[in-house]
Image: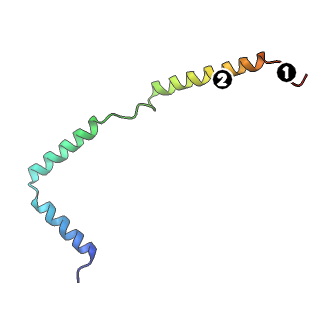
Amino acid sequence: MATMDDWIAWESAKRLRSWDPAEQWQVLQQTITWAERQATVRRNTPTACLREQRHKLCQMRTRQADQELEPDANT
């Protein structure tokens, strides 16, 4: 009696036999080209990281200056 794994392997082999090797190669190349053309995530680029760093440093300086201007609540 064939198991589910045997059946899956048999169906997979049948599917591969039905492909023309040239067509299979062409589809593989098209898939790779499509994947390469997809937009990459731009949030972690060096430029974006430096921009984020400048923004955070500016916020820290602003908060520090605001704290220095506030009257001391302990006195």
Q: Quadrant of the N terminus?
A: bottom left
Q: Residue furthest right?
A: 75
Mark sitting on residue 60: 2
Q: Amino acid at mark 2?
A: Met
For label 1, the crowd category at 10 Å Cα-Cα, with few meaning under 14, some 14 to 19 and many 20 or more, is: few
The residue that label 1 is drawn on is 72
- In the image, is residue 33 above or below residue 47? below
**Which is more toward the observer, 22 or 69?**
69
User: Residue 67, percent across and down?
Assistant: 75, 21
**Which is more toward the observer, 28 or 62?**
62
- In the image, is residue 4 above or below residue 74? below
Q: Amino acid at mark 1?
A: Asp
Can you tell which quarter of the image residue 59 is in? top right
Q: Is residue 9 left or right of residue 24?
A: right
Mark sitting on residue 14: none
Q: Residue at x 17, y 65 (%)?
A: 13
Q: Secondary structure at mark 2?
A: helix
